[in-house]
Structures are given as structure tokens and as C-alpha cells.
Image: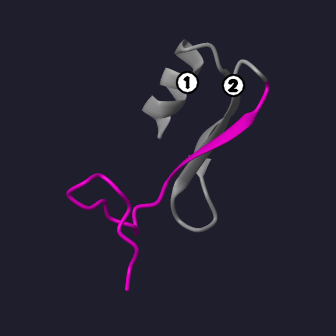
Amino acid sequence: MDATLREAVAAGGRLVRAGEKAPWGGTRGYFADPDGFLWEVCFNPFFPLGENGFVTLPE
């Protein structure tokens, strides 16, 4: 999550809120793209990634 925020800033985005612990147990941070749109980047350790790299929701 932190690496994604750094990459967004390096590409011209503006860091709005650095990565921090979220109340639900993961981490999150926010950046604004060059047009000013806000984006949330988050990591949820409770949702594993499948072989295709997509989130696998618990059944």
C-alpha cells in the first residue's frame, strides 16, 4: 500500500493522507491525481489474492 502511494506521488499525484492503520484491521492512505480526483489505496490482510492477482472474497 505504501509503495503504491509512493508510485502515485512519483507519477504526479499529491499525497493527501499517508498510510495508516484502518479501524477494520488493514491499512489505507489517500492521494489526489493531477486532476484533483481523490483515490483510496488500501490493504486488507483478511482477503487473500488468487493466482490471477484478484481479491478472493471469503465464502
**Mark 1 lies on residue:** 8
The foreground one among 6 and 23 is 6
Q: CA distance from mark 1 to mark 2?
A: 8 Å
**Mark 2 lies on residue:** 33
Q: Marks 1 and 2: CB-CB under 8 Å?
A: yes
Asked if residue 31 lies left or right of residue 49, the reply is right
Q: Is residue 54 magenta?
A: yes
Q: Which residues are magenta?
A: 36-59
Q: Residue at x 35, y 56 (%)?
A: 54
Asked if residue 17 lies left or right of residue 51, the reply is right
In x, y percent, where is residue 14? 69, 21
Classify mark 2: helix, strand or loop. loop
Q: Residue at x 39, y 67 (%)?
A: 47
In x, y percent, where is residue 10? 53, 14
- Answer with the quarter of the image where residue 41 lies: top right
Amino acid at pointer 2 = Asp
Question: What is the residue that sits farthest to the right in this orientation?
Answer: 36
Classify mark 1: helix, strand or loop. helix
Q: Residues within 10 Å of mark 2 (few under 14, many from 20)?
A: some
